[in-house]
Amino acid sequence: MTFMPDKMPEARAFFSLTMYDLNNNLIKNSKNYCITSLNPTYEMEPDGSLILYIQAENPDSDKESNWLQAPKHEGFFMVFRAYLPGKDIINQKSLY
């Protein structure tokens, strides 16, 4: 998932991308169950974009901070939340 520099989610408080199993439980994995701007551990690209890796296998040690580990053989879904969202999110304008 990529957010371009001029299309970052506008959340005046914070945003999060959280992964759940099909029973609405948080996915248990070796890393975090979510990526959030509240306590950002992700790294921005040199051009100001944000690339998130949503996959079962570790993408590489230099990309691990942007990795949201998905299960290998189970269904899942993700929820993006923006707390105190900006106008583009409220008006449902594209973020990508």
Image (cartoon, grey):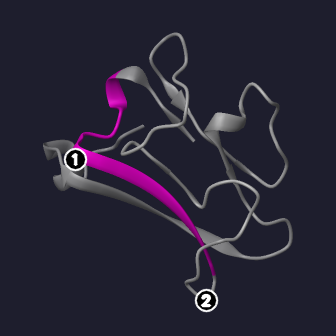
What label sits on residue 23 in the rendered view? 2
Instruction: Give the label on residue 68, or none.
Output: none
Along the viewing direction, whichever of 62 and 47 lies nearer the viewer? 62
The disc labelled 2 sits on which kind of residue?
Asn
Quick check: 49 above or below 60?
Answer: above
Cα gap from disc 2 to disc 1, whole angstroms? 28 Å
Label 2: state its secondary structure: loop
Quadrant of image for the N terminus: top right
Q: Earlier in the sequence, mark 2 or mark 1?
A: 1
- Residue 60, by quadrant, is top right
Residue at the image position 24 percent from the left and 50 percent from the top: 89
Q: Nearer the viewer, residue 13 or 92?
A: 13
In the shown orientation, is residue 47 left or right of residue 75? left
Q: Position of residue 65 (x, y in %)?
A: 64, 36
Q: Amino acid at mark 1?
A: Ala
* Quadrant the C terminus occupies: top left
Q: Nearer the viewer, mark 2 or mark 1?
A: 1
> Is residue 13 a member of the stretch shown in magenta?
yes
**Which of 91 and 10 lies nearest the eye of the viewer?**
10
- Tell me which segment is drawn in magenta: 6-21
- Left/right placement of residue 67 relative to residue 30 reads left
Q: Residue furthest top?
A: 46
Residue at left 80%, top 30%? Answer: 61
> What residue is disc 1 on?
13
Q: Percent position (x, y) of residue 8?
A: 35, 33
Q: Which residue is farthest left?
A: 87
